[in-house]
């Protein structure tokens, strides 16, 4: 599902995997991978070149988190792209963060985990 909207009066684009919701009862921890854009447009969106880099970053996120989580959504707004994952354990997140930082030399990568049994971020986009 692809959604468009606004965040702080700038464009927001989000895509969410609606089939991921079937894991809601088993995955109660949200892992956010935030990647600030290096060269955002005035609207806070990536340039075509940076969008290609972000696609490679997404593939890396999915590959490194595949066995532990599901990528439920991707949000681009305000000069940042966030990958929204859900998991059932946060034990792997610190190592995942270090692995991502080493694998992504082009961008700063921020990772945080938070208990979210209601999938609040997911639900705010997918009703």
Image (cartoon, helix red, strand yellow):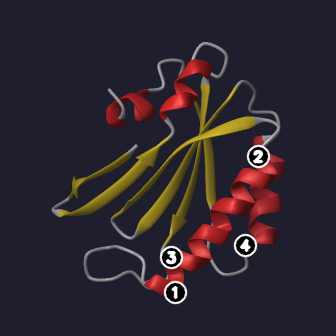
Q: According to the image, label 2 marks what residue?
A: 65
Q: CA distance from mark 2 to mark 4?
A: 14 Å
Q: Which residue is located at x 48 percent, y 75 percent?
A: 37
Q: Nearer the viewer, mark 1 or mark 4?
A: 1
Residue 93 rendering spot, x and y as whole percentages: 76, 43
Number of marks: 4
Quadrant into which the C terminus falls: top left
Q: Are marks 3 and 1 in contact (CB under 8 Å)?
A: yes
Report whether 24 appears left or right of 12. right
Quadrant into which the N terminus falls: top left
Q: Which residue is located at x 34 percent, y 37 percent?
A: 125
Q: CA distance from mark 3 to mark 2?
A: 21 Å
Q: Nearer the viewer, mark 2 or mark 1?
A: 1
Q: According to the image, label 1 marks what residue?
A: 49
Q: Earlier in the sequence, mark 2 or mark 1?
A: 1
Of residue 17 and residue 25, the one placed in the foreground of this image is: 17
Q: According to the image, label 4 marks what residue?
A: 104
Q: According to the image, label 3 marks what residue?
A: 51
């Amino acid at each position: 599902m692809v959604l468009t909207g606004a965040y702080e009066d700038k464009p927001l684009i989000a895509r969410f995997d609606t089939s991921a919701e079937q894991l809601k009862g088993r995955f109660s921890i949200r892992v956010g991978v935030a990647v600030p854009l290096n060269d955002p447009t005035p609207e806070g969106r990536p340039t075509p070149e940076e969008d290609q880099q972000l696609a490679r970053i997404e593939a890396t996120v999915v590959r490194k988190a595949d066995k532990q989580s599901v990528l439920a959504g991707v949000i681009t707004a305000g000069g940042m792209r966030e990958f929204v994952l859900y998991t059932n354990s946060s034990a792997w997140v610190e190592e995942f963060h270090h692995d991502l930082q080493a694998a992504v030399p082009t961008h700063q990568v921020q990772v945080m985990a938070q208990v979210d049994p209601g999938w609040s971020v997911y639900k705010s986009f997918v009703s």
